Image: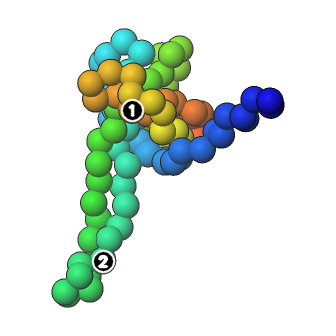
Amino acid sequence: MQQAEKKSGGRTLVGTVVSVKMDKTIVVRVDNQVKHPLYEKVMRRSSKLYAHDEANGSGLGDVVRIKESRPLSKTKRWVLESVVDKAAV
């Protein structure tokens, strides 16, 4: 019997780092646009997600790509995949 291959699925999002105060954890703000169901005005919505950063390599204001993963703690469900753009300091 052959072993089933692991799928590397899961969502990938791009957002901005808003906090690096924790060890190996970053807070990423992901912005999206939604249309109001009645008035059809486009509104901006954002959500803050906790992501695991093993090397503490990202800084405040960096644009990063995060990937969905298994639960790592009570609130942490994302893993840093790559830094898209470093913030100008």
Locate the N terminus by quadrant: top right
Q: Which mark is residue 30?
A: none
Residue 56: percent from the left, percent from the top?
48, 16
Q: Secondary structure at mark 1?
A: strand
Q: Secondary structure at mark 2?
A: strand
Graded by Cα atoms within 10 Å as few (under 14), some (14 to 19) or many (20 or more), the crowding at tag 1 reads: some
Q: What residue does disc 2 label?
A: 35
Q: Is residue 20 visible?
A: no
Q: Is residue 39 left or right of residue 67?
A: left
Vertical order, 87 against 31 (above or below) = above
Residue at 29% over, 53% down: 46
Vertical order, 31 against 70 (above or below) = below
Residue 26 occupies quadrant = top left
Residue at 45% over, 30% down: 70
Residue at 54% over, 44% down: 10
State the scheme by which the image is colored: rainbow
Residue closest to the eye, 72 or 30: 72
Residue 24 occupies quadrant = top left
Residue pushed farthest right?
A: 2
